[in-house]
Image (tube, helix red, strand yellow):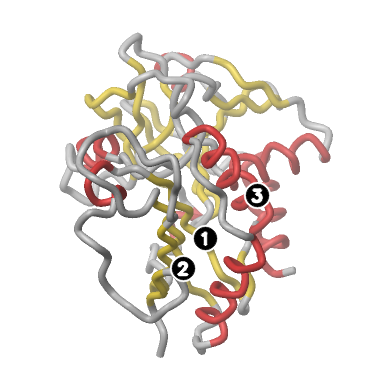
C-alpha cells in the first residue's frame, strides 16, 4: 500500500542537500480526508498558493498534486485519515541564497486519523498559556512554513494530560493562536478571533468558520486579544482542519461550566460540512 510519494514516486527519503531539510525552506498542509475526498481542499490550495507567493516558491501544477493525492486516497480502506503535503525549494548548494531555477520537491504522506477523546468535542478541553512567544513577521504570517520551532518549544512546555492545547502570544502579550489551532471568543453573540497579520497561522478551518458564521448572521471581528479579554468571554473554542471545533472548558483559572450555544451551532455546521 502506498503511504509516501516523493515527486510522484514511492520513496521514503530525500537528498541531504534538499533545502527543506537544510533550512526549513518550504511549506506544508495537513489535510483531513473524508470518504476518499480532501476536506476543504480549495482553502488548502489557496493557502499553499499564498505561501508560495510569499516565499517566492514555484507553485506546482494543481492537477499533478491532485492526481498524486488521489493515488494515496484510492489505496486506503479507511473512511477517515490524514494526508500531509510538503513542498520544499528542492536541492541546492550550501548557503541561504536560493537558486534562481527551482526544482521543487513534493512530498505526500498518508497518516492514521488521530484518536482524539470524544469528550474533547462534547465537554471541551483545558488550555494553558505558553511561555514561548511568537515572532512577528508579515512575510511569514498566515502561511504554514516548515519552520515550526516556536510551536515545538511551546508544545513541550507541558507533559501531563491536564491540558490539551497551549496558547501562544506575542512578546507584547497578545494571544495569537494555539500550538496547533486557532482560537475564537464569543461575547454578546458576536464572534472574535485574533488578528494574524503579523504572526500566526491562518487555519483553513478558521476561514471556514468565519464564512459560516457570517452566513448565519453573526458579526465576526479580527482584533488583538489580551489574556484577560479571552478569560472574560462568554464562550471560547479552538479550531483546526483535523479536529474541527473543540470548546474550551478551562483557560488559566477561568472555567466555563457548559458548552455555549454559538459553539454548538458552529460545531453542527462543521459536522454537516464534513459529511457532505
User: For this view, does 56 lie left or right of residue 49?
Assistant: left
Residue 61 placement (x, y as % from top left): 62, 60
Q: What element carries label 3?
A: helix
Q: In which quarter of the image is residue 167?
A: top left
> Which residue is the site of mark 2?
82
> Which residue is the site of mark 3?
43
Q: How crowded is mark 3: few (under 14 residues within 10 Å), some or many (20 or more)?
A: some
Residue 126 in view of the camera: no
Q: What element carries label 2?
A: strand
Q: Is there a contact, CB below 8 Å, between mark 3 and mark 1? A: no
Comes first in the chain, label 3 or label 1: 1
Front-most of residues 101 and 275: 101
| Mark 1 → mark 2, Cα distance in angstroms | 6 Å
Q: In which quarter of the image is residue 6?
A: bottom left
| Mark 3 → mark 1, Cα distance in angstroms | 10 Å
Residue 168 placement (x, y as % from top left): 34, 28
User: For this view, does 58 lie left or right of residue 93?
Assistant: right
Name the mark on residue 31. Answer: 1
- For the point 68% across and 54% down, which residue is it? 42
Residue 250 placement (x, y as % from top left): 38, 35
Comes first in the chain, label 1 or label 2: 1
Name the image quarter holding the N terminus. Answer: bottom left
Residue 57 placement (x, y as % from top left): 49, 43
Name the image quarter holding the C terminus. Answer: bottom right
- For the point 38% across and 75% down, which residue is it? 4
Name the mark on residue 47. Answer: none
Q: What element carries label 1?
A: strand
213 in relation to 61, above or below: above
Q: Is there a contact, CB below 8 Å, between mark 1 and mark 2? A: yes
- For the point 39% across and 63% down, which residue is it? 117
Amino acid at each position: 500500500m502506498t503511504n509516501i510519494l516523493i515527486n510522484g514516486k514511492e520513496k521514503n527519503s530525500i537528498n541531504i542537500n534538499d533545502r527543506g531539510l537544510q533550512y526549513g525552506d518550504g511549506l506544508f498542509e495537513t489535510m483531513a480526508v473524508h470518504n476518499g475526498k480532501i476536506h476543504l481542499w480549495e482553502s488548502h490550495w489557496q493557502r499553499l498558493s499564498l505561501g508560495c507567493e510569499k516565499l517566492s516558491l514555484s507553485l506546482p501544477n494543481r492537477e499533478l498534486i491532485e492526481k498524486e493525492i488521489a493515488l494515496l486516497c484510492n489505496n486506503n480502506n479507511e473512511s477517515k485519515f490524514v494526508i500531509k503535503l510538503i513542498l520544499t525549494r528542492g536541492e541546492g548548494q550550501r548557503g541561504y541564497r536560493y537558486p534562481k531555477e527551482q526544482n521543487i520537491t513534493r512530498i505526500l504522506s498518508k497518516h492514521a486519523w488521530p484518536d482524539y477523546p470524544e469528550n474533547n468535542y462534547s465537554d471541551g478541553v483545558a488550555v494553558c498559556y505558553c511561555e514561548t512567544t511568537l515572532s512577528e513577521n508579515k512575510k511569514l504570517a498566515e502561511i504554514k512554513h516548515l519552520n515550526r520551532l516556536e510551536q515545538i518549544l511551546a508544545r513541550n512546555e507541558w507533559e501531563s494530560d491536564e491540558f490539551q492545547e497551549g496558547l501562544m502570544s506575542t512578546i507584547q502579550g497578545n494571544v495569537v493562536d494555539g500550538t496547533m489551532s486557532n482560537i475564537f471568543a464569543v461575547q454578546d453573540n458576536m464572534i472574535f478571533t485574533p488578528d494574524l497579520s503579523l504572526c500566526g497561522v491562518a487555519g483553513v478551518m478558521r476561514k471556514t468558520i468565519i464564512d459560516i458564521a457570517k452566513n448565519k448572521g453573526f458579526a465576526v471581528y479580527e482584533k488583538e486579544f489580551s489574556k484577560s479579554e479571552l478569560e472574560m468571554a462568554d464562550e471560547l473554542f479552538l479550531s483546526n482542519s483535523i479536529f474541527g471545533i473543540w470548546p474550551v472548558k478551562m483557560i488559566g483559572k477561568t472555567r466555563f461550566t457548559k458548552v455555549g450555544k454559538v459553539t454548538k451551532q458552529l460545531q453542527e455546521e462543521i459536522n454537516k460540512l464534513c459529511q457532505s
